[in-house]
Amino acid sequence: MPSRLSIFIVLSLLAALHAFIGWRILPALDIGHFQWLGALLLLASLVLIPGGLAATGIRRQPLSDRLAWAGMLAMGWFSSLLLLTLLREVLVPVLALTGVPATTLALPTAWLVVAGSAVLTLIGFFNARRLAAVVEVEIPIAGLPVSLHGFSIVQISDIHVGPTIKRRYLQAIVDRVNGLTPDVVAVTGDLVDGSVQQLANHTAPLAQLQSRHGAYFVTGNHEYYSNAPAWINEVRRLGLTVLMNEHVVLDHDGGALMLAGVTDYGAHHFDESHRSDPHAAIADARVATAVKVLLAHQPRSAAAAADAGFDLQLSGHTHGGQFFPWNFFVPLQQPYVAGLNRLRNLWIYTSRGTGYWGPPKRLLAPSEITRLRLVPA
């Protein structure tokens, strides 16, 4: 749990940023007595953002979900409003150097900030709430047996069933996955944001996942925020195989493929016995396999996976940044943001996620359902 001091610092910073926007934008709008309306909207945002984040602690429904919705929408709008306000602070002085008076630029640029933040929030909302598109990816594997040519894995990741993502949203994903007739379904973590008691009804569609060799799940960091042991049991009850530093060998038309999974990269901070270990996941292999695939929630498992001898790692966690400009900050924590990358003999595919976290907003980082096919190199 965050300390009171850290909460105070974050809330103070949030208040200061709202005050900065009000100071720089509201007077420039030239709306006279209606400035109070803009101030009221900023005050509502300042209250709703922390309120939405804390809404999961409210047991009463639908109050909890409605507060979460309001807070997350406010967070998405505030993010764009702050970004455009800062951009305006840079752009107006630069344009003034060309001879255009700053006073002439003040009014139109202030309205552009207001209108732009609204448009970006609406576009981001549509992108987040629509059904994720199917992304087709070919993985070239040297020495791939003929029996495994075209072997397909459909990956879904980072759905974040919780306050704003419910059963209907997940059901549409499951239906789309089943329509792809995969050989394997891989769910690479961050399935939920909430307890089993709160969300069991909404994760129930996972039991309908269909594929030739079954559906497999690995934990993400958000499972550990939401009582991972309980969710591991629930996911197993729904019929998925949970891989915790272990593997299975799949016999596909006479070709053997190892499918392994590790717990989340930071799982040991919650339970030392859950420490993520790609070497343990591949250990004690009793059958020679032509392809070794690892499911690992975070891309930063890749170095250990390459050392362990895996051919392909499927990850998520990053959301591709989810919306600009956060995609530029992901590399500070993860080696890969999205798409297919190579580390020595290991291919790493990082999904941009099938749902979203926090604000229902995606910009320049569309959600995806990924169909990966093994092809000969």
Image (spheres, helix red, strand yellow):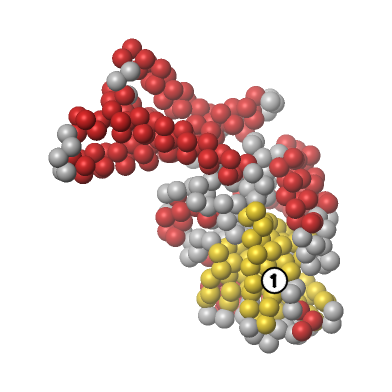
Foreground residue, 233 or 99?
A: 99
Q: In terms of image quadrants, where is residue 10?
A: top left
Q: Position of residue 324 (x, y in %)?
A: 45, 48
The residue at which mark 1 appears reads as: 373
Quadrant for the C terminus, please.
bottom right
Disc 1: CA contacts within 10 A as few (<14), some (14-19) or many (>=20): some
Q: Position of residue 241 (x, y in %)?
A: 79, 61
**Disc 1 secondary structure class:** strand
Looking at the image, which residue is at 18% across and 37% down? 100
Which residue is the extreme one toward the front?
99
Looking at the image, which residue is at 26% across and 42% down? 91
Looking at the image, which residue is at 69% across and 75% down? 374
Task: Identify residue type, mark 1.
Answer: Arg
Q: In terms of image quadrants, where is residue 351?
A: bottom right
Q: Position of residue 188 (x, y in %)?
A: 66, 59
Foreground residue, 29 or 286?
A: 29
Q: Image height check: is 132 above or below 106?
A: below
**One can see residue 358 in this view:** no
